[in-house]
Image (tube, grey):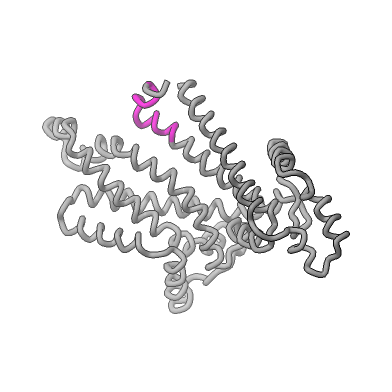
Amino acid sequence: MPAFLLKRLATLLATLLATSVIVFLVLEILPGDPALLVLGIDATDEQLAVFRQEYGLDRPALERYLHWIGNLLAGDFGISYAYKTPVWPLIAERLALTYPLALFAMLLTVVLALGLGVFAAANHNKPGDVVIMGISQLGISIPNFWFGLLLILLFAVNLGWLAAGGFPGWRAGFGPAMLSLILPGISLAVVQAAILARITRSAVLEVLREDFVRTARAKGLSRSQALWRHVLRNALIPVATVIGLQFGNLLTGTIVVEQVFSLPGLGRLVFQAISNRDIEVVKAAVILLAFTVVAVNFVVDVLYAVIDPRLKVRDV
């Protein structure tokens, strides 16, 4: 088991290193001068030179990359060009909204997808299966921002049950804060739940055809008992793989959804930072999101070994 974990941890670190290089290079080749964007077209050459020197923009690219990585390892995310404050407090404040929103959407995704997928597989080629697959196909084709607008129109404008947007903050209480996340959480989850439901159905159907399931049924287990005791666990490996990938999709999806619902989360901060060419904020936010996604997939890899212990033996 330690060798299995060390191998996965080495992969995690290599992925983060490659991501940091790609993020830095992409932001380097983007058009626009951060000094000119922040100071304006009326800034003098002397003011622009002072700004570039203050933020290290006059140094060679390799030196700036190594300096950035060294600061990251020391817990320093740099200084925002636009806000003139350390980047980490800006990001930490927004993560208090984005992470709970993504986790809430992930919870909705898993609950809906597992329930619908298993039900569809248990009723293969029956009306329930056909209806669920039809709904899932519709869900895959719906953009989450458009679905979010529909939710606002129905539940906020017409029915008046929920607010159309905004976030009162966690200090207002857990209930009011979560109420403001219901509509954006649903709009994020609908597409991912549709995808995961189809994958769950396919995985369960494949396991249902295995010999050990027929043996379990022959020993007296009912179809539902065999399904929940034996089939679902063996079908979880491909499902867990997709769940790990989908969490990354949910995090990146918050960039658009937070704009639709006027939520002051990390996605909205990144959107504003890109518009302002606030490179330090963009780099820190992207590398943090990448770390989150890679860490979640590391946890999924560990869960593989829990679900199927044979995997860690093969990988050692």
Residue at coordinates 29% horizontally, 35% vertically from top-left? 234
* Residue 181 placement (x, y as % from top left): 51, 61
Residue 277 sits above or below residue 225 on the image: below
* Residue 57 placement (x, y as % from top left): 77, 50
Along the viewing direction, whichever of 107 and 45 lies nearer the viewer: 45
Instruction: Determine the image quadrant of residue 287.
Output: top right
Residue 281 sits above or below residue 71 on the image: below
Where are the magenta residues, as a range? 301-313
Reply yes or no: does residue 311 show up in magenta.
yes
Along the viewing direction, whichever of 300 and 179 lies nearer the viewer: 300
Residue 206 sits above or below residue 115 on the image: above
Residue 171 visible at all: no
Q: Quadrant of the C terminus?
A: top left
Instruction: Determine the image quadrant of residue 275.
Output: bottom right
Give the left or right position of residue 289, taking residue 204 as reference: right
Reply yes or no: does residue 9 show up in magenta.
no
Q: Quadrant of the N terminus?
A: top left
Residue at coordinates 42% horizontally, 64% vertically from top-left? 143
Residue at coordinates 44% horizontally, 43% vertically from top-left? 244
* Residue 194 placement (x, y as % from top left): 34, 56
* Residue 294 placement (x, y as % from top left): 52, 40
Q: Residue furthest right?
A: 46
